Amino acid sequence: MPARKKKPAKARAKRPLDSLKYEVARELNLPKEVFEEGDWGNLSSRQCGAVGGQMVRRMIEAARKAIAEEAAAQAIAGFQSGLGLPLETERDTTPES
């Protein structure tokens, strides 16, 4: 008997993506059947594509923001170490006198 496999990452990402999908659909003023019954069958391909496109735009923007924040944090840490200043984590753990 084959070993059990873990669920793929795609399955774990389903719930957050669904909530994003419905949030975008609300903002695009799609019919209420979409929210109440989850019925996407009466929508045109263009409407469904608009939801997907907005979802991708938001995910890209979130990734860009995360990358920018990480780069800024690394730059600050680099400046602090170059100036001989304690890093944020070192300041938090230093006992006060």
Image (tube, rainbow, N blue to C red):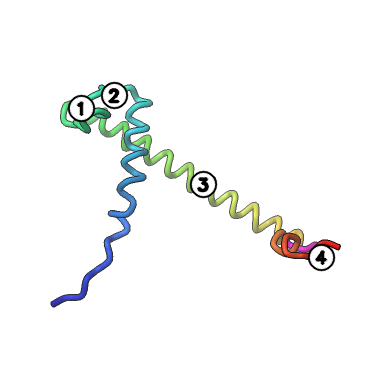
Residue 29 location (% of width, % of height)? 33, 22
Distance between the Cα atoms at labels 2 and 3? 28 Å
Identify residue type, mark 1: Leu
Residue 34 location (% of width, % of height)? 24, 28
Identify residue type, mark 4: Gly
Tell which circle, 1 or 2, labels the residue nearer the N-terminal end.
2
Distance between the Cα atoms at labels 1 and 2? 8 Å
Residue 86 belongs to the span the image colors magenta: yes
Identify residue type, mark 3: Arg
Task: Report the disc number at residue 30.
Answer: 2
Identify residue type, mark 2: Leu
| Contact check, label 4 and label 3, Cβ < 8 Å | no
Q: Magenta part of the protein: which range?
A: 83-87
Please tell me which residue is depicted at 58% across the width and 49% down the height of the picture.
Answer: 68
Please tell me which residue is depicted at 82% across the width and 61% down the height of the picture.
Answer: 96
Q: Is residue 20 left or right of residue 91?
A: left
**Badge 2 local density, few (<14 within 10 Å), some, or many (20+)?**
some
Residue 9 location (% of width, % of height)? 32, 58
Q: Nearer the viewer, mark 2 or mark 3?
A: 2
Distance between the Cα atoms at labels 4 and 3? 30 Å
Tell which circle, 4 or 3, labels the residue nearer the N-terminal end.
3
Q: Which residue is mark 1?
A: 43
**Badge 1 local density, few (<14 within 10 Å), some, or many (20+)?**
few
| Contact check, label 1 and label 2, Cβ < 8 Å | yes
In the structure shown, which secondary structural element does the residue marked by tag 3 occupy? Answer: helix
Q: Which residue is mark 4?
A: 84
Q: Which residue is mark 3?
A: 64
Task: Report the disc number at residue 27.
Answer: none
Q: Is residue 39 above or below residue 58?
A: above
In the structure shown, which secondary structural element does the residue marked by tag 2 occupy? Answer: loop
